[in-house]
Image (tube, helix red, strand yellow):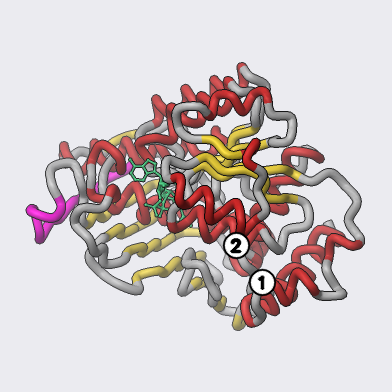
Amino acid sequence: MNSRRDFLQKLGVSALALHLAPLSGWADSKNKPNETYDGPVLRVAIMGLGSYGTRVAEAMQSCVKAKLVGVISGTPSKVKDWQSKYAIPAKNCYNYENFDDIKNNPDIDAVYVITPNGLHHDQVIRVAKAGKHAICEKPMALNAKQGQEMVDACKKANVKLLVGYRMHFEPKTLEVIRMRKAGDFGKVLFFQGLCGFSIGDPTQWRLNKQLAGGGSLMDIGIYAINGSRYMTGEDPVWVTAQETKTDPVKFKEGVDETIQFQFGFPSGATASCLSTYKMNNLDRFFLNGDKGFAELQPSTGYGPIKGRTNIGELTQPVTVHQTVQMEEIAGIIFENKQPIVPIDGEEAVKDLKLIDAIYLAAKTGQKVDVKL
Ligand code: NDP
């Protein structure tokens, strides 16, 4: 445990330096961490070379235990750019038609699916059938049924299914979880999760029901859903929800602009959350017990995450989330490490069940019971 914490702390400090220094400066540094690491390296192909895929690829350049070795893309010009930027050999480049051939490629261990939500289900199942570990972005699928099919396919193929829940490795988040478990806030009674941003281009896939699966809830509200579980340490047993829409032209039928939802937990604690595509800089978690509170704001952005509790400021190191996440994923795959908060497919299915329940509650106006 100590060595893990030391490692994360070192990585935190290094990552902070990385934030300030160009990547090449880091790679050339004498203190390059991989000079001391001689364990297995997770060889990853990224599927979907978009905005987040680009961020993950950059962050992976400072990984010790994980390495970007391949790409799967529908855009040949991007493949060419990535090949030269990351020294990716042609034999590790695929498109959406031929990536099943990855099963014959012994130089790739895992595929990280970073495409629009509506494509994750089929793509992850194809990755599993190719015998490779699947890492999938959130939301893992469009609904719990799809999610369960993905879990089953990966089990059947004997590969891991892990989800890009980067906050599960974020130091201040983990400190709040540690304090809550230690009883520092007393009996937990209330969580508030506010997540949103103002979305631009009306033609983007995030506003297309088929590709996004919904609206803000799928994309950003999922942080409050997932956060309500790791902040309280409980899974909801009931859900209520209300949807409001000010722009029905931009946010069409089935694409939510703003949803508020409430959860009830077995202990009697409750959560009150808001997900929106209409307000910028909305990124706040608040947990209250009968003894004290924790506040994270920003709580789920790329950082720096900031927070305080009734005891004082949270001073844990700032990290590059995707670097730490990929290091930890390598540990989960190679060493069977158990993260403090799971990132496996089953964890994602719980969030998808809650998404299903929130949409149902908003539509019917009824309280929906859930069993995760
Ligand atoms: P982008 O639109 O920036 O990129 C998606 C990429 O997917 C495209 O560039 C394209 O890559 C590929 N793609 C394949 N088919 C399609 C299609 N029909 N329409 C559009 N793109 C397609 O999206 P993001 O990178 O922002 O998001 C991708 C996923 O990552 C989503 O599931 C999102 O929720 C998640 N995400 C997670 C974040 C996190 O912090 N964990 C943050 C941001 C996003 P190519 O041209 O190479 O085929």
How many numbered marks have been drawn onto this rendered protein structure?
Answer: 2
Does residue 245 appear to the left or right of 42 in the view shown? Answer: left
Residue holding disc 2? 58
Type of amino acid at the residue the image marks with label 1: Leu
Residue lying farthest to the top in this orientation: 156
Horizontal and vertical percent for residue 84? 61, 56
Q: Cα distance, mark 1 to mark 2?
A: 8 Å
Which of these two is toward me, 181 or 364?
A: 364
Horizontal and vertical percent for residue 89? 67, 44
Quarter occupied by residue 37: bottom right
Type of amino acid at the residue the image marks with label 2: Glu
Residue extent of the magenta highlight: 239-251
Q: Residues within 10 Å of mark 1 (few under 14, many from 20)?
A: some
For numbered disc 2, what is the local secondary structure?
helix
Residue visible at 73% across and 38% down? 333
Residue holding disc 1? 23
